[in-house]
Amino acid sequence: RNESYIRGRCSSFGWIEGIRSHVKDAEGLWASLRSSKNYADASATLLATFEQLEFMIKDEVSRNDSNSSCSNLEAGRCLHEFSLSLAKIGLWKESSRFCDSCLSLVAQNIWSSELVAALLYNSSVIHVENNKLDLAEERIEQCLNIVAKSIGLESVLYLKAVNQLGCVLSDRRDFRAAEDCFGKVITALKQTTGRYGIEFGTSLYKMGRIKHRQGQLDEALICYERALDCEKKGLGPHHVFVANAIMQIADVFLRQELFEQAERNYEKCLEVLSHDGALPLRGRVILCVVNGKLLGLRNQFEEAVKKYEEALLLIREDPSPSAKMKEARTLVMIALEYEKKYEYDSSERCLEESIAALKSALGTMHLDIATVLVNLARVKIANHKYVAASECLEEAMHIQKSNLGDGEEVANTLCVYASCLKVCGDFENAETAYHGAMQMIKSSDGGRDSVSLVGPLLGMADLMNIIGEYDEASEYYVECLEIQKIAFGKIHDSIANTLYAMGLLKHNQRNFARSVVFFKKSVDIRIKLHGETHPLVGDTYNMLGFVEAKNGNLDGSLRCLENALKVRQMLGDRLKEAETLLNIGHVHREKDQFELAIEHYDDCMSIRIAALGSNDATVAEAYMALGNVKSDMKRLDEALSSYNEALQIVESVHGKDDPKVGSILQKMGMLQFRSGSLVGAKSSLEKVVRIYRKAGKEYEPHVLKPLFILGNIYNILRQKDEAHSVWEDAYQRSIAIGDEADQDMHDALSRLVNAH
């Protein structure tokens, strides 16, 4: 920091070369301090050095006399050296300040020169990294204006500037405008017969990223594959950028649930990285991440998480702000693994850490934070934390509206918010939210693309289905299907999804024959798209088998369920396998094949206990199924024992006053009544009545049957007054309920009350 030494060096070499030499020395000091793991001190020392040099340079310029050896232009170029140096270590905020000062000095003399254009370009890149997108866009547009006038629209610098504008617009979520920019660059460079292959590949890659983010996966795949060819030719087959492009291709296949292709490409990526014995930090991070993805794909959960955690340790070696974004993305990957294993608390923790990392790097209003908040809300919904999920979504929408205004992205988040309201029973506000999302899409530029309406239309249709407005639900589904067929043709995943939902609608309407038709159409499309062993094929076969049984086609039901079982066993999805085993058991029970039913129920229970522990509600469901079939077989003591096991679990999970407890006690009471254990039946049914009464008006109709049986028990025990009192209570409740009451039971109660 010796000023005389610095001035002497600059006098000997000239200001620009002298400052470059001093910057190199300062960077060496920074590297030395950083190697001692003291990043903050190293960065502070480097910044202080540059600020001292800046003061000295500006002092030299301000002399404005013949003794001044540093012009405005030279001073600006010196400050640019500081800006680039700080950018290399991720100090974007400080870098942007020096860059702006540089521009101010240089532009005083030569505003329209190529040098200013290059500085404006660099300034735009730095402001993007610093999350100053307005400034980034302003700088690159200024650059474009200068280059267009001074060099021309066909120049490579102009195309690079257009490419940078596309990057800015992409970060602002203006995907259509960004696509226009990248498309213009791709079209122009296509004519250059390979002279700018790397730039061509970069634009293709960035176009692929936009398509990927928008869910246009086939188009993304084409862009990535063309970019990969360019990068191989320009950089060689074993460059880290080549590995990154292959990883993106694998990610597309994974999102399309084409697992074999995804696995093959992840392995290709590892093969590329294995050729470099001294990978840079970025390459080592990619190596860990790809290994994590492969292990996750192979359902090796713990090993996958370990690999992602290794990636985190590598990323945290670089505590610069830009590394925080990589840390945040890796935490999201870990969260996804936990979510796949239904470990929602751990998934939430990782997503919350991801948001904290993003906020520390980008401030509180960056759009990437909104994206992670939406993911966090989805996990909280799955974890039944609806209030917390709503708060996440409200914060996400605030960020999106502040950056983008009311538009398609806010509408998509509003749909998730509506689904949260729907799950927790706030149907009125859910309907309002879906309407708001549709209105936003119709009134925004994205409204011209009617496919954007599919999300809120499906959400509204599902809502109408839930609240029993079946005709309205059907209208929404039909409207959605028409949009999808125009956009995608007859064979597409989204069409299969809508047909599946329409099958559920017809099931709820108890129109099982029509429900079967929709599920068959859905599974046919899914098989054509994905083959026989895809998870969605297994899901649809499972539901088709369930509905076939309700439609009275038990043999057809078994065929579908066996198909579902094969798919789920092949994929290793044990919990879904258990679900299908339970459904197969139900069909065997309907066919009076009781031993086969018990066998499948036992297998279902073993899987659920192994996966979830013995105190899970789904284990109780399997115990209830066993109790039902043993009751059919007149093995009443065994049936009662199974019901009691279920009771202990449900009381533990939901509490002793939950209506689910009442339902099990009612089964037990009826069984005890049939076996002649009147005292036990009386005790069970009295508890049922108390629970249902406490549950409120919604459960009034459920009270009638236990009261009716209780009256019969009192009558058998010759407690006539108690019998009459209970029957009278039940009769008055039946009158109050009206149409919801069982008419046969109402008539029976009327006769009993009048007879006594």
Image (cartoon, helix red, strand yellow):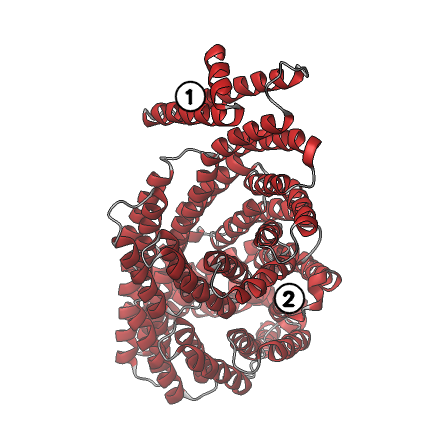
Asked if 67 appears above or below 619 in the picture, the reply is above
Pointer 2 residue? 452
Q: Would residue 652 be visible to someone looking at this image?
A: no
The residue shown at (59%, 59%) is 419
| Amino acid type indicated by mark 2 | Ser
- Drawn side of residue 29 relative to residue 298, left or right: right
Q: Nearer the viewer, residue 397 or 632?
A: 397
Residue projecting furthest to the right: 443
Q: Residues within 10 Å of mark 2 (few under 14, many from 20)?
A: many
**444 up-or-down from 571: above or below:** above
Which residue is at the front of the view, 146 or 8?
8
Across and down, in percent, residue 370 comes to 57, 47
Measured Cα–Cα span from mark 1 to mark 2 = 50 Å
Category of crowding for the residue at label 1, using alpha-carbon neighbours closer than 10 angstroms: few (below 14), some (14–19), many (at least 20): few
Q: Residue at x 35, y 70 (%)?
A: 625
Residue 304 seen anywhere in this rendered image of the structure: yes
Residue 488, by quadrant, is bottom right
Query: Could you tell me residue 629's position as x and y percent?
Result: 33, 75
Secondary structure beneath dot 1 equals helix
Give above or below for 660 relative to 578: above
Tag count in the figure? 2
Q: On the image, numbered disc 1 is attached to which residue?
A: 41
Three-letter amino acid code at disc 1? Answer: Asp
